[in-house]
Image (cartoon, rainbow, N blue to C red):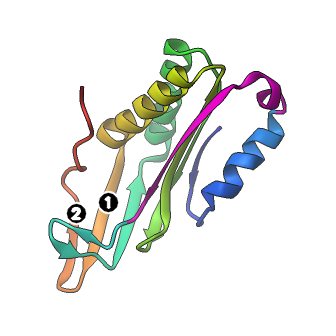
Amino acid sequence: MIEIRSQAFDPWQEIPAYQAAHPELKTRAGASAAFVGTMRDFNQDERVDTLFLEHYPGMTDKHLTAIRDEAMQRWPLLGAMILHRIGEVHPGDPIVLVAVWSAHRAAAFEACRFIMEDLKSKAPFWKKETLQQGERWVESNTPGYSN
């Protein structure tokens, strides 16, 4: 499942819904890993009131599919989902959900991290923050962890 959504979502309802649609995960998956990214109320030491996320539909869908497909090839995954918000979000709102299922924990952890790091550093999303003194485009994401 790959979905770009303009409406709010609850990641803790999305995961069981995915699992219900894929009943084989109940008996075959020994591990699952999930990452939920939420909007902070600050960036670059300034308060952020709202965030507006834009994307280029065909390009973004293609990129998210490629990330998921590469993870499915690199690790023995039984399932993977990526759900990403667009439009206006507020502090505390979920922005992104990445969840994966596999027989073993190492594959689940590594694939989830791979998908999320690629998504944050390469996926074509643009962010505009609303501050008390105006608006600004976010020029870069916070750096991820590297070994």
Work out whether residue 35 or residue 82 is closer to the camera in this orientation and state it: 35
Q: What element carries label 2?
A: strand
- Crowding around mark 2 (Cα neighbors within 10 Å: few <14, some 14 to 19, many 20+) is few
Q: Which residue is drawn at 36% across and 33% down?
A: 118
Q: Quadrant of the C terminus?
A: top left
Image quadrant of residue 129?
bottom left
Q: What element carries label 1?
A: strand
- 28 relative to 13, above or below: above
**Furthest residue in direction bottom, as rendered:** 132
Which residue is labeled 2 in the image? 137
Give, as a single range, the part of the protein colored magenta: 23-39
Left-right relation of 105 to 67: right
Whether 47 is among the magenta residues is no
Q: In which quarter of the image is the N terminus?
A: top right
- Identity, as a three-letter code, of the amino acid under mark 1: Lys
- Crowding around mark 1 (Cα neighbors within 10 Å: few <14, some 14 to 19, many 20+) is some
- 38 relative to 35, above or below: below
Q: Does the CB distance between marks 1 and 2 fall below 8 Å?
A: yes
Which residue is labeled 1 in the image? 127
Q: Where is residue 22? Give x, y as percent.
A: 80, 33
Q: Which residue is drawn at 50% across and 21% down?
A: 106
Q: Is residue 41 shown to the viewer in this render?
A: yes
Q: Is residue 67 shown to the viewer in this render?
A: no
Left-right relation of 36 to 124: right
Image quadrant of residue 103?
top right
The numbered mark, 1 or 2, whose residue comes first in the sequence reads 1
Work out whether residue 88 or residue 39 is closer to the camera in this orientation and state it: 39
- Identity, as a three-letter code, of the amino acid under mark 2: Trp
Q: Where is residue 65? Give x, y as percent.
A: 53, 30
